[in-house]
Image: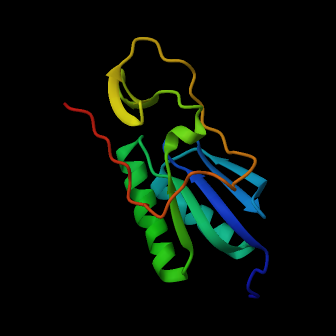
Amino acid sequence: MPMPSRQVDLLLIPMASPILLGVYEDGLLVESIKREGKISDLLPQLFQELLERFAIRRIYYARGPGSFMAIKLTYLFLRTLEITRGIELFGCDGFLFNGNRPIRATGQLYFLKEQGRIVTRRLERVPEATFSLPQRLHQLPCTKETQPLYVIPAV
């Protein structure tokens, strides 16, 4: 099987269902993928398809806050790709992709970003907070800090 020659960057938002994945060429969104299901089932099949189609240079991912297990599994999966395939990995703040709206933690607890800090609060009413892929990948404030942003609320 010939190696794919089309070089792309990917942006993965795994914190809520459906997961979102953007394929970017020269920094511009050329394909968006939405998948429902368990992250542990979705990542292997999704990346098998993508690795057959593209030469992936960099992967950006929303490293939290959000579903603890989804973020943890995503990090381990992507870190493995970084080590075994030499694909650069970058971490991003999940609030970049939902307009800085509350992100569900558990029950009526939500993550909020206030004055640069992530806090948890109980909210009775929560504004619609859907995630979306940016049209441009350039100038996103993502970093080489890729470990999950674990913000676990007190029990």
Q: Note whether residue 17 is visible.
A: no
The image position of residue 38, as x and y in percent, is: 48, 49
In-image side of 131 versus 5 (left or right)? left
The residue depicted at 72 percent of the width and 59 percent of the height is 23
The quadrant where residue 147 appears: bottom left
- Identify the coloring: rainbow
Relative to residue 65, is residue 81 drawn left or right? right
Residue 79 in view: yes
Q: Residue furthest left?
A: 155
Residue lying at 56% horizontally and 51% vertically, measured from the top left? 141
Please state the horizontal and vertical placement of residue 53, each as a whole percent of the image. Answer: 74, 72
On the image, the x and y values in percent for residue 7 come to: 75, 74
Q: From the viewer's perspective, is 9 left or right of 72? A: right
102, 51: nearer the viewer: 102
Q: Residue furthest front?
A: 115
Task: Count up the numbered dots.
Answer: 0
Which of 139/88 is in front?
139
- For the N terminus, the image quarter is bottom right
Instruction: Determine the image quadrant of residue 154.
Output: top left
Give percent across and percent down for residue 119. Answer: 33, 31
- The quarter of the picture where the C terminus appears is top left
The one of 2 and 114 positioned closer to us in this rendering: 114
Is 123 displayed left or right of 24 in the figure?
left
Residue 90 against residue 153 in the figure, above or below: below
Depicted 5 relative to depicted 89: above or below: below
Residue for point 70% across, 75% down: 52
Q: Is residue 153 above or below residue 32?
A: above
Which image quarter: residue 36?
top right
Among all residues in the image, which is located at the extreme bottom? 2
